[in-house]
Image: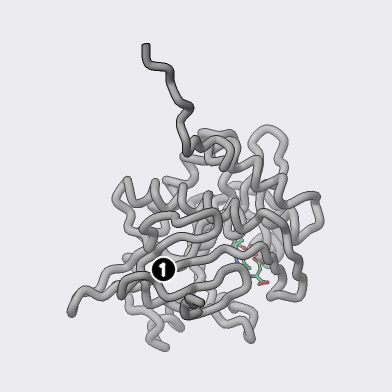
Amino acid sequence: MARRKKVYEGKAKIMYEGPEPGTLVQYFKDDATAFNAEKRATIEGKGVLNNRLSEFFMTGLNAIGVPTHFIKRLNMREQLIRQVEIIPLEVIVRNFAAGSMAKRLGMDEGTALPRPIIEFSYKDDALGDPLVPEEYIIAFGWASQQDLDDIVALALRVNDFMSGVMFGVGIKLVDFKIEIGRIWDGEFMRLVVADEISPDSCRLWDIETGAHLDKDVFRRDLGNLTDAYTEVARRLGVMPTNVTHTPKPTLIN
Ligand code: TMP
Ligand code: ASP
């Protein structure tokens, strides 16, 4: 029986060796976790939706010249990606106060921020992904000052793109998290957007009703997570049912 090598398994995704060197297959699971995996569930259909949505956002970013790891979608749950060296940081961009920022500063969720605010968490589950200042990042060698400047520029471009796309379908992009990877081309290095961009890693609020259309539905027990993600996919026109694979036969006279 054919078997492929599992390279890494995380909480929501599995990476397999890809068909060519420098590629990986990224498989989206239905598993959801919150609060550093204290809360867990399997939510049928989440993986399929996130695979589609991440494809949609990454393809759009590639098209406007923001480099990402995404190559192509392979099937309902898998996509082909460039293998990258992940920088061990969660890069968080906030447009409105919510979540941990609202809690830390005692702000009302939804308060508009004076400008997009970028913060970094050190990716370490055992430590609960602690917030870290740039000083730590540079001193401990996780990234250089030049890398950080490039990461901020990338994050702001992703923010503008995502905010605009979401606004177009009546959704406010409150905040989001991205991860950045390094790709080596001989002695030269490029930074690209990696991991995933999906309602698992964004806060998305309906502009009219304020309804949560993201993983807070699961974190805060606000209803059915698949329904929320399906609504995002429907508005963006990326519902699997919207895709015609086999055109109907046409009668030739
Ligand atoms: P926070 O307000 O809980 O710090 O979350 C900020 C953003 O980052 C929010 O859009 C959710 C996302 N996020 C992740 O993608 N992964 C995580 O582990 C956490 C804590 C947040
Ligand atoms: N990454 C966090 C966890 O595993 C989940 C989150 O709140 O997004 O628990």
To which residue does mark 1 refer?
180
Residue 93 x %, y %: 51, 58
Q: Is residue 251 above or below residue 236?
A: above
Ligand 1 falls in quadrant: bottom right
* Kind of residue indicated by mark 1: Ile
Colour basis: one colour
Residue at (49% x, 35% y) in the render: 244
Q: Nearer the viewer, residue 134 or 201?
A: 201
One can see residue 147 in this view: no
Position of 230 with respect to 4 (left or right) is right
Q: Which residue is the extreme one toward the bottom?
A: 140
Position of 44 with respect to 24 (left or right) is right
Q: Which residue is the extreme one toward the top?
A: 253
**Residue 83 is drawn in which quadrant?**
bottom left
Residue at (68% x, 60% y) in the render: 99
Q: Nearer the viewer, residue 127 or 32?
A: 32
Residue 226 x %, y %: 70, 50
Residue 125 x %, y %: 62, 81
Residue at (36% x, 58% y) in the render: 71
Q: Which residue is the extreme one toward the left?
A: 187
Circle 1 crowding by C-alpha within 10 Å: few under 14, some 14–19, many from 20:
many
Tell me the quarter of the image containing the C terminus.
top left
